[in-house]
Image: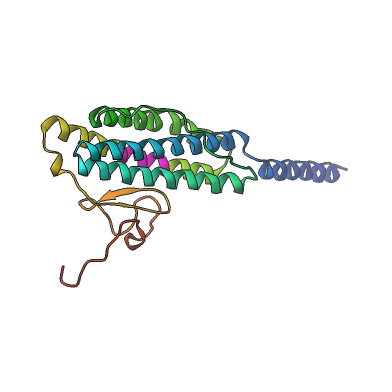
């Protein structure tokens, strides 16, 4: 009799485990949809900021905004894939209105936005995904958060060059990992992506060096 009860207990635990394992990580799916919309808005914003920077003669800052926009699009695309994997659907992003001001003001807006995503938004989303045991969501959030940290650094450097009047010292060429959105310039690019180990030759913007260089 004891063996029977033990067997029933084990079967009940196994059934509960299977149910939990197969259940959709509800909070993470909500967060993925929120992040998809946020990154879609950010990509559109940075594209507009790039146009403004070009109009004001800040060619290198324009290129930085373009690279960051491409990175955000990759993040948004990753979220769509994970949502679909969890059985969810994603509609069109809701692009809220935003202001395009001077390049200095736009950089400050970008700095504020990246700071929020790194310190508040993604830290909470990663925690939720880990609690729900949703590794795909946690990985995509982590990739994005780590990328935003680099964007934040680059935007701060760009702001400093405007203050100091040496904008031409900024890198002009940028490379973006198509898998995770990691962003590099020609001075800090690696042979393999630090986040997902994708090869440099696969990066968006990669150009093979001529023999002898």
Whether residue 150 is in magenta: the answer is: yes
Which quarter of the figure has residue 132? top right
- Residue at image point 35% right, 32% down: 114
**Furthest residue toward front:** 55
* Count of picture labels: 0
Instruction: Determine which quarter of the picture holds residue 62.
Output: top left
User: Does 26 appear in magenta?
Assistant: no
* Location of residue 102 with respect to 91 vertically, above or below: above
Left or right, 3 with respect to 207, comes to: right
Residue appearing at x 32%, y 60% in the figure: 200
Magenta stretch?
A: 143-151
Residue found at the very far left of the displayed protein: 165
Residue 146: x, y in percent? 37, 41
Check the image and report above or below for 152 versus 185.
Answer: above
Location of residue 75 in the rendering, given as x and y in whole percent from the top left corner: 44, 44
On the rendered structure, is 167 left or right of 188? Answer: left
Name the image quarter holding residue 8: top right
Q: Quadrant of the C terminus?
A: bottom left
Give percent across and percent down for residue 199. Answer: 35, 61
Quarter placement of the N terminus: top right
Residue 7 in the image: state x and y as whole percent.
81, 46
Of all residues shown, which one is farthest toward the right? 1
Which residue occupies 30% across, 35% down?
152
**For residue 62, side relative to residue 169 (left or right):** right
């Amino acid at each position: 009799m004891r063996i029977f009860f033990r067997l029933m207990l084990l079967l009940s635990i196994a059934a509960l485990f299977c149910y939990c394992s197969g259940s959709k990580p509800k909070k993470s799916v909500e967060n993925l949809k929120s992040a998809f919309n946020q990154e879609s808005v950010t990509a559109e914003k940075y594209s507009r900021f790039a146009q403004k920077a070009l109009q004001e003669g800040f060619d290198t800052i324009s290129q930085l905004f373009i690279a960051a926009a491409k990175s955000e699009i990759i993040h948004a695309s990753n979220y769509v894939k994970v949502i679909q994997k969890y059985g969810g659907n994603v509609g069109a992003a809701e692009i809220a209105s935003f202001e395009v001001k001077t390049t200095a003001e736009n950089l400050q807006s970008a700095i504020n936005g990246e700071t929020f995503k790194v310190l508040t938004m993604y830290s909470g989303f990663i925690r939720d995904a880990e609690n729900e045991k949703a590794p795909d969501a946690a990985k995509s959030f982590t990739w994005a958060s780590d990328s935003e940290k680099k964007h934040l650094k680059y935007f701060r450097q760009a702001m400093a060059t405007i203050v100091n009047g040496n904008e031409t010292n900024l890198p002009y060429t940028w490379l973006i990992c198509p898998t995770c959105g990691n962003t590099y310039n020609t001075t800090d690019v690696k042979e393999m992506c630090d986040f997902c180990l994708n090869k440099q030759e696969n990066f968006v913007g990669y150009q093979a060096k001529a023999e002898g260089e």
